[in-house]
Amino acid sequence: MKYLMVALLVGLLAFPGGAQAAAVGRFTKVEGEVNLLKQGKLPAMPVKLQDSVEPGDIIRTKSQARAQITFVDDTTMSISPGSRVAIESYMYDAAKKQRQGVVQVFYGMVYTVVSRILQTEKPDFLLKTHTAIMGVRGTKWYAVLHPIATDVFNESGKVCASNAFAEVGGEVCLKDREFTRVGWNLPPTIPTPATREDFLFLQRQLSTGVTGGASGAGLPSGAAAASVLPQPGQIPTPGIAETVIGAPTPPASTLPVLQITPKLEPPAPPPGPVLPPHPPR
């Protein structure tokens, strides 16, 4: 019994916060209904300001909710309404100037600011989606998820994007105010300039959610406008995504066209509307 008490005392001294000792960040902004699944398990708990997040946690924002997480290295991630994000792992050692963070976004949109630039050979912060992997050392960028693609808008710094499947190959590195799209089973598109209006539009989407501007009113003419999802019930291009049951078939000239030449035989894409045409290069 004496040895057990000593072991417990040592454990408390080493981890004074108990379970909170594993915290890798905290919620610094919470608006609306935001839920947290500890270690990815139900029940989902409502999030309060300054609640901690740990590796394995999943964050869900409802349709009118937003959140921001500030990690232990001062990296911030803003999460738009209607999003789902998982903290896979996060390690930061200020003394050794080492960081290794991995975050996965299942759907929605995030804006990430990695401000501390550490001298490392490989990217020390990874953001994963269903189609893409983004690696950075220090930058500000948006990741917008669509059913069969991820749009990456780099505001400043440098972010490199590749397909989530290594066998697809290809990588692009974006400089300030550049855009790329990583489609299902496709390499990233060549970097394309993004305008000031694009980033203003993205800021609004961060508040309203990815489909918040789908009506087309007041959309900019740049890449961000082209990344907006089509209206619900719009028929995808045959052969790219499934037809929406019960929706009327528009004339062929009005069907959105996605010009792609798959390198590999793609698997069946997840359900959802098709993307609009690729933004002009």
Image (tube, rainbow, N blue to C red):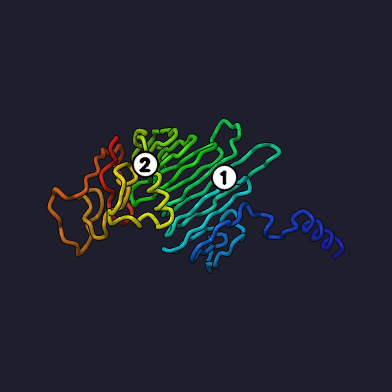
* Kind of residue at badge 1: Gly
Q: Residue at x 40, y 40 (%)?
A: 163
* Above/below status of 121 relative to 74: above
Mark 2 burial class by Cα count in 10 Å: few <14, some 14-19, many 20+: many
Q: Residue furthest bottom?
A: 43
Residue plotted at (49% across, 66% down): 33
Q: Which quadrant of the view contains residue 246?
A: bottom left
Q: Is residue 165 left or right of residue 259?
A: right
Tell me the residue that label 1 is attached to.
Answer: 101
Give coordinates of residue 73: x percent, y percent.
62, 45
- Quarter occupied by the C terminus: top left
Secondary structure under tag 2 reads strand
Contact, mark 2 vs mark 1 (Cβ under 8 Å) = no
Give percent across and percent down for residue 223: 33, 42
Secondary structure at badge 1 equals: strand
* Residue 11 drawn at (x, y percent): 77, 57
Give neighbour class at mark 1: few <14, some 14-19, many 20+ (Cα, 10 Å): some
- Residue 182 is marked as 2
Amino acid tagged 2 = Val
Which residue is painted at 46% across and 62% down in the image? 65
**Residue occupying the far right of the picture:** 2
Q: How many marks?
A: 2
